[in-house]
Image (tube, grey):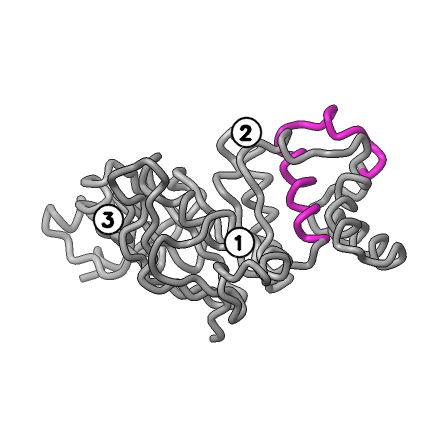
């Protein structure tokens, strides 16, 4: 698969800090993949996210998106056209009094033709399930709906990659589910590359790939089932694992011959049933 983001030996230190926030990150993100980045506050995950569309640029090392060096100031607009960002607080991203006007804001500022803006706005709102509310006032929407409008605003720019920096941090459980379902659908049905930053374990289970960060470094990288299966590492990092993963782990510790990993109840039941046959 084609790598749309390449990160090479990325170091970053905030001005005035003695310690680095990122300590030599090497990653590639493939086109059309759903990559979850998990870690506690201070792990470096949000700092990493901000490097993907040049909000921050490396102190040392290199980040390229679609072959463009994010540190090249002459290419800044193109970088941000290629990589759209959605942040924690949807209220901070709403700039208009009507939903469809808010979604149109970014393409208008990019100089897109009015007829094309209309197409993009309608398409983006349909993709996030907010088309029927396009004439509503954003401030009257729920938190999850506001965040879906923010996502639609990014989609209307037609980026190749959408980066979501803890987009559910300020939402209730229902809003969190809405946002995760929306970005999962965008990846699976529309082929959009998604980088989802979170500290919620349950938001990672449907990803293609899970990256765990700690102290500015990548401490685990693989399929979610494989990463969560390392229960000792996750506990060391103070992170939880799915109950099904913990059950399989505990049964193995007790001597059960269980092969494979399970992130959901049905898969867990099948593994246990298979082990009981032997």
Q: Is residue 30 above or below residue 175?
A: below
Residue 273 left/right relative to 32 = left
- Residue drawn at (63%, 57%) of the image: 77
Category of crowding for the residue at label 2, using alpha-carbon neighbours closer than 10 angstroms: few (below 14), some (14–19), many (at least 20): many
Dot 2 falls on a residue whose secondary structure is loop
Q: In this picture, which residue range is highlighted in magenta?
A: 134-156
Badge 1 is on which residue?
53
* Mark-to-mark CA distance, 3 and 2: 31 Å
Badge 2 is on which residue?
171
- Residue drawn at (64%, 45%) of the image: 151
Residue at the outermost top position: 140
Q: Please name which of the two marks, 2 or 1, marks the residue nearer to the observer.
A: 1
Category of crowding for the residue at label 1, using alpha-carbon neighbours closer than 10 angstroms: few (below 14), some (14–19), many (at least 20): many
Which x, y percent locates residue 185? Answer: 60, 54
- Residue drawn at (60%, 64%) of the image: 191
Category of crowding for the residue at label 3, using alpha-carbon neighbours closer than 10 angstroms: few (below 14), some (14–19), many (at least 20): many
Residue 48 left/right relative to 9 = right
Residue 237 in view in this figure: yes
Residue 259 left/right relative to 190 = left
């Amino acid at each position: 698969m084609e790598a749309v983001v390449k990160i090479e030996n990325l170091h970053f230190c905030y001005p005035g800090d003695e310690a680095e926030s990122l300590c030599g990150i090497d990653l590639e993100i493939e086109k059309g993949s759903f990559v979850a980045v998990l870690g506690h506050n201070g792990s470096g995950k949000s700092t990493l996210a901000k490097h993907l569309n040049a909000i921050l640029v490396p102190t040392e090392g290199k980040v390229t998106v679609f072959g463009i060096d994010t540190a090249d100031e002459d290419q800044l607009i193109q970088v941000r056209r290629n990589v759209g960002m959605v942040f924690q607080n949807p209220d901070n991203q709403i700039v208009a009094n009507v939903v469809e006007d808010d979604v149109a804001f970014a393409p208008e500022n990019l100089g897109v033709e009015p007829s094309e803006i209309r197409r993009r706005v309608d398409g983006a709102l349909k993709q996030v399930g907010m088309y029927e509310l396009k004439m509503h006032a954003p401030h009257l929407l729920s938190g999850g709906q506001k965040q879906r409008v923010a996502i639609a605003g990014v989609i209307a720019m037609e980026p190749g990659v959408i980066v979501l920096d803890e987009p559910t941090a300020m939402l209730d459980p229902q809003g969190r589910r809405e946002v995760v379902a929306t970005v999962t659908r965008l990846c699976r049905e529309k082929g959009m590359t998604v980088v989802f930053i979170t500290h919620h374990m349950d938001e990672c289970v449907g990803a293609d790939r899970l990256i765990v960060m700690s102290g500015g470094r990548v401490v685990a990288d693989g399929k979610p089932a494989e990463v969560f299966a390392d229960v000792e590492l996750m506990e060391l990092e103070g992170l939880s694992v799915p109950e099904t993963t913990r059950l399989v782990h505990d049964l193995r510790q007790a001597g059960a011959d269980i092969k494979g990993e399970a992130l959901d109840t049905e898969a867990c039941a099948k593994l246990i049933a298979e082990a009981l046959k032997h």
